[in-house]
């Protein structure tokens, strides 16, 4: 298995969308469902043209995962980490995060940051297993009386 992680281009918006939807379908029945499932190729393309970047993971030259990110005051904030279901549990997410960490180091970014739903402990455990710590808990309000409990996580870059 040859795993390669590449920086995404704006022209990769459709591929990023496809990988994300496949990975996030497991949350379609969550309360509330993930807002990732409402995103479009156009919204991703627009974000990539503006201030968002992405990494795409390929196994034997086939796309299997991705992450999107942007620079914020305190570091590099990432979201929508996605690995297609048939490739989950094989260390691909950790490899994507390692590539993201290397990217941050090269840019002299002090930390990686993310938010994780409290209702998805396996994701919190994934991040903890590679050195992330919980900064705080908060509730995100998404209109229509939708409230999502999340933790903010951080990993300092050395």
Image (spheres, helix red, strand yellow):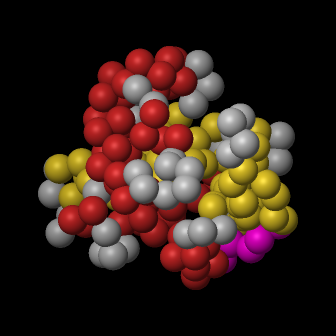
* Camera-side residue of 47 and 141: 141
Q: At x 83% / y 40%, what residue is drawn? A: 73
Picture quadrant of residue 16: top left
107 vs 150: above or below = above
Where residue 153 appears, as percent x and y from the top left, is 72, 64
Q: Quadrant of the C terminus?
A: bottom right
Look at 54% across and 24% down and name the residue there. 47
> x, y (%) of residue 118?
66, 68
Answer with the quarter of the image where residue 59 lies: bottom left
Q: Position of residue 60 (x, y in %)?
A: 15, 57
| Left or right, 64 with reference to 141 | left
Residue 131 colored in magenta in the image: yes
Residue depicted at x 33% and y 75%: 89
Q: Is residue 5 visible?
A: no
Task: Using the image as rendered, state which of residue 127 and residue 25 is in the foreground.
Answer: 25
As for residue 66 lying within the magenta part, the answer is no
Can see residue 120?
Answer: yes
Q: How many marks?
A: 0
Q: Is residue 120 left or right of residue 94?
A: right
Task: Name the residue located 55 percent from the left edge and 56 percent from the top edge.
Answer: 31
Q: Which residues are magenta?
A: 130-135
Task: Tell me if 8 is positioned left or right of 125 in this view.
Answer: left
Which quarter of the image is occupied by the N terminus? bottom left
Q: Is residue 131 above or below residue 53?
A: below
Q: With 39 as the anchor, is 113 left or right in this view?
A: right
Residue closest to the eye, 37 or 103: 37
x, y percentage for residue 45? 44, 21
């Amino acid at each position: 298995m040859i795993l390669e992680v590449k920086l995404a281009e704006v022209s990769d918006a459709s591929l990023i969308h496809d990988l994300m939807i496949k990975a996030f379908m497991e949350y379609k029945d969550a309360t509330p469902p993930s807002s990732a499932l409402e995103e479009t190729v156009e919204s991703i393309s627009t974000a990539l043209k503006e201030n968002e970047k992405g990494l795409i993971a390929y196994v034997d030259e086939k796309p299997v995962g991705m992450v999107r990110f942007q620079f914020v005051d305190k570091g590099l904030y990432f979201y929508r980490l996605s690995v297609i279901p048939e490739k989950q549990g094989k260390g691909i997410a950790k490899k994507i995060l390692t590539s993201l960490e290397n990217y941050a180091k090269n840019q002299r970014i002090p930390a990686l940051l993310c938010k994780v739903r409290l209702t998805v402990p396996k994701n919190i455990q994934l991040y903890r297993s590679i050195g992330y710590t919980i900064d705080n808990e908060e509730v995100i309000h998404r209109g229509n009386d939708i409230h999502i409990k999340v933790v903010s996580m951080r990993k300092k870059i050395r």
